[in-house]
Each structure stands twice: as structure tokens, then as C-alpha cells.
């Protein structure tokens, strides 16, 4: 244990004096689970360390950005080499061109790309491009799918599909979401001639993990075509994680536009949107849809992204899926045998944990699971076993290629110990 002035609590109190809630992103707070968040100082492979020298097996991995694990030597080498030449120029660089080419080579249908600095920018810009290309204003989103924090995407559903939606957060005027329609994931929406685009997480990974039902994505493709609307896949999480070509390869459904993030930055701030040439050429300086960013396509982030994609081959996904399958099977067994109702969905290399007896297929059923309060207990018991999960019930577990078989075994053993304690105690407050 470090000196008290360098404890997690001390750093948290210090952070709250400078950062709202002590964090730069609310998902990092422990509001949903209670307790004092740890302050991270170091990551390597499957592990992360805090200011008190506690070492955790990490299944957050920067919310999926670190598929190779923390501080992979070849990624670190690429970053160091890039910084030797400068960190930003305000001009196109070979690194961003090479990264764009690598993405295009992997994802059939992506003909042109535009780099940005975050997933929020990618989805916001893709929708603006879709509106410009179709000369329509309405967009359709699915409840529980998160597409960043731009105003018109922070909408909550009204009483029916045709009703006006309302902002899901303070600070967003009602007028900003009047052209946003919110509907239910895994149910086909009604799309009319006013809809510019439908944006969807092909595998929902922001309400826990919810797999698309059979033919949901292919039928969504058909109804978009019939209405003349564009289909946008938000692959910020699934891109280059569930398959070499992402979810569009996995389900053999090709959208008109894609949004990428996390993995393509190699742990640095970088994202992109791309798709058909005729749509992407609506963007300035070729077309009339304006979009820009001083640090877009940053050469250091692009170098990191190139290094990561170079290391992700077909065998990488087979290896990672095998690790996740072993983990999912183990979690189901040890938690279930303690008499705790749990489901552990797996879609290729993604894994979720839902507490409760019902199958989760949309946001409403995900909320039922979250409302049991069991995830809060599970989170803290796992943290006590030195396993770090996301501090909220709507996140997935991100396994990296750095997690070894013994790491997976240790995690399952930790879950068994956590479930045993949960089965013997009343609900605890933190």
C-alpha cells in the first residue's frame, strides 16, 4: 500500500477539484457501482496497475481499444518512431494514407475514408454526410445503441414510433432531436421517404452484449434500399474485433457507411467514417458537406493503428475467440452453480454478463437485468479478487490477445469466489 497521500481515494478527491465528478468521461466513474474509483498509472499486456500498486487483470482494455493488450512492444515502437518525426503537421501524412489503405483492404465496400479523432465525431459526420447525400433530414436510431454524444443522437423514445422524441440529457434542445426517431433493437422499423439514414450497432455492445436476431441486419438493409435511405454501421466497437473485416464481414451485410474507432487508433485518439465513393464525395473539398478537424488523421495515432492492424490476421481472431469461449463457458458454470441467475452471451470475440432469469434481446430487457443490482455486487467482488471489469452493467468484457490461458482460469476462479460471496450475503451498498 502506498502512502495515504498517494492512495486512490486521495487522487480521487484531488481529481474532483479539477474534473467534474473526478473524471474526463462519465463511464469511468463508479457512480453506477458505488465506491472509490482507482487511478491507473500503468498497463502492460492483460494487466493494469493503480497508484496503490494494486495489479488487476484488466477486462476493460480502454473499452476495447487495446485488442493486443496494453503497451504492446511493436505498437510502442511505432509510436516512438512516429513522434521522432513530429506529432502533428496540419497536412496529410503517409501514415494516414497507409492506414486508410489497410482499412479499405479489410472491409469490402469501403471505397473512401475520412479520419476524425473520436467515435462521436465519426457518427456525427457520417450522419451529416448521409443527410447531404439524400437531401433528407430524419434519422432512425435504436434504443440502447450508443453512437456518441452529439446532440441529435442523445434522444429518448416517445410513446410510439411516429411520436416526437425527447432529449435524453439536459442541455440538448428539443428542436435538435425532432428529426430523430428512436425504435427498438432487433425489431424492424418503419422507414419512409423522409429518412436519410438508419444507424445501428450491428452487434449491440452498449447495453451489455445483445446479438442481432437472425436476418435483422439483412432485412434492415432491404428496407433501407426500398425507402432510398442509407444504412450506417457503427463499428466503433466491432470493427476489427469480431472479424478481420468487422461485423459487416461476419454477417455478410454491407452498409452504405461505416464508423470505426478504438482499435484503429492503437490506443490513441483516432476514428474514421467511410463507405461508398459517391456518398463520401459529398464531403468538402469535393462536395458541399463540410467536415474538418485540425488533428484528424494524426500521424502518431495512425502509426499506432497501422501497427495494430498489421498484427491482426485471421488466426488472431480464432485465438481470441477461443479465449473468450473458454471464459464465457467458465463464467456460466461457476456463477450458475452458486444459484445465481445469469446469462453470459458471446458473439465471436465479445462477451457480456447479464444477471436475471430472462434473455436479453433489447434495451428494455437489458434494463431489467441492470435493475437487479447484482452487477454492482459482482463488480466489487471481482475487483476484490484483482479482476477489473467496467464499472457499469451496460458494458461488455473486453478480452485481449495478451490474456493467457492461466489468466482466463484465474478470472473464472475469481468469478466463482465472487458468486459464492454474493450467494451468502444480502445486497451490499458501496
Image (cartoon, helix red, strand yellow):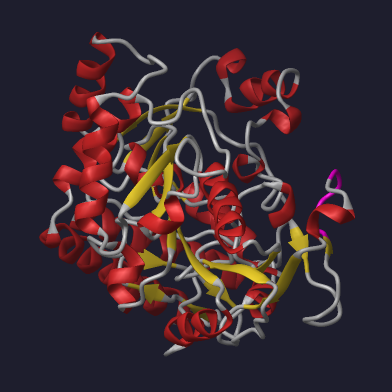
**Magenta segment boundaries in residue numbering:** 167-171
**In the drawing, does residue 93 fall left or right of residue 156?**
left
Q: State whether residue 236 appears in this view.
A: no
**In the drawing, does residue 383 fall left or right of residue 99?**
right
What is the quadrant of residue 315 in the picture? bottom left
Residue 429: image location, x then y, percent: 74, 54
Residue positioned 65% across, 31% down in the render:
23
What is the quadrant of residue 179 in the picture? bottom right
Say if 149 sits above or below 130 in the image.
Answer: above
Q: State whether residue 81 appears in this view.
A: yes
Along the viewing direction, whichever of 373 and 225 lies nearer the viewer: 225
Along the viewing direction, whichever of 281 and 351 lies nearer the viewer: 281
Along the viewing direction, whichever of 136 and 389 lies nearer the viewer: 136
Residue 257: image location, x then y, percent: 44, 60
Residue positioned 65% across, 74% down in the render:
363
What is the quadrant of residue 9 in the picture? top right
* Residue 30 sits inside the magenta stretch: no
Amino acid at each position: 500500500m502506498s502512502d495515504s497521500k498517494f492512495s486512490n481515494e486521495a487522487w480521487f478527491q484531488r481529481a474532483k477539484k479539477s474534473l467534474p465528478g473526478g473524471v474526463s468521461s462519465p463511464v469511468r466513474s463508479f457512480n453506477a457501482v458505488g465506491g472509490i474509483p482507482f487511478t491507473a498509472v500503468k498497463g502492460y499486456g492483460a494487466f493494469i496497475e493503480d497508484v496503490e500498486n494494486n495489479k488487476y487483470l484488466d477486462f476493460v482494455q480502454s473499452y476495447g481499444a487495446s485488442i493486443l493488450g496494453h503497451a504492446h512492444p511493436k505498437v510502442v515502437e511505432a509510436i516512438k518512431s512516429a513522434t521522432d518525426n513530429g506529432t502533428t503537421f496540419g497536412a496529410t501524412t503517409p501514415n494516414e494514407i497507409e492506414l486508410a489503405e489497410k482499412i479499405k483492404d479489410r472491409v469490402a465496400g469501403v471505397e473512401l475514408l475520412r479520419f476524425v479523432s473520436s467515435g462521436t465525431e465519426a457518427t456525427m459526420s457520417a450522419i451529416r454526410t448521409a443527410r447531404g447525400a439524400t437531401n433528407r433530414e430524419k434519422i432512425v436510431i435504436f434504443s440502447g445503441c450508443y453512437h456518441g454524444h452529439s446532440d441529435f443522437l442523445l434522444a429518448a423514445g416517445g410513446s410510439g414510433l411516429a411520436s416526437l422524441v425527447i432529449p435524453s440529457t439536459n442541455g440538448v434542445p428539443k428542436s435538435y432531436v425532432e428529426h430523430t426517431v428512436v425504435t427498438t433493437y432487433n425489431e424492424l422499423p418503419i422507414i419512409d421517404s423522409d429518412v436519410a439514414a438508419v444507424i445501428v450497432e450491428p452487434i449491440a455492445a452498449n447495453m451489455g452484449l445483445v446479438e442481432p436476431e437472425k436476418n435483422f441486419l439483412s432485412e434492415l438493409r432491404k428496407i433501407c434500399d426500398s425507402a432510398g435511405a442509407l444504412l450506417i454501421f457503427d463499428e466503433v466497437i466491432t470493427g476489427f474485433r469480431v472479424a478481420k473485416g468487422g461485423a459487416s464481414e461476419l454477417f455478410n451485410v454491407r452498409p452504405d457507411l461505416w464508423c470505426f474507432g478504438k482499435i484503429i487508433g492503437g490506443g490513441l485518439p483516432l476514428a474514421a467514417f467511410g463507405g461508398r465513393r459517391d456518398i463520401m464525395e459529398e464531403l468538402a473539398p469535393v462536395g458541399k458537406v463540410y467536415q474538418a478537424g485540425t488533428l484528424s488523421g494524426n500521424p502518431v495515432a495512425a502509426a499506432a493503428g497501422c501497427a495494430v492492424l498489421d498484427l491482426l490476421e485471421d488466426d488472431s481472431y480464432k485465438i481470441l475467440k477461443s479465449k473468450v469461449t473458454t471464459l464465457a463457458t467458465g463464467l456460466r458454470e461457476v456463477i450458475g452453480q452458486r444459484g445465481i441467475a445469469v446469462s453470459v452471451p458471446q458473439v465471436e470475440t465479445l462477451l457480456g454478463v447479464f444477471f436475471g432469469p430472462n434473455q436479453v434481446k433489447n434495451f428494455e430487457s437489458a434494463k431489467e437485468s441492470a435493475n437487479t443490482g447484482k452487477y454492482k455486487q459482482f463488480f466489487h467482488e471481482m475487483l476484490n479478487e484483482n479482476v477489473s471489469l467496467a464499472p457499469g452493467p451496460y458494458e461488455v468484457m473486453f478480452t485481449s490477445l495478451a490474456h493467457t490461458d492461466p489468466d482466463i482460469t484465474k478470472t473464472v476462479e475469481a468469478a466463482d469466489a465472487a458468486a459464492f460471496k454474493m450467494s451468502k450475503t444480502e445486497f451490499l451498498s458501496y
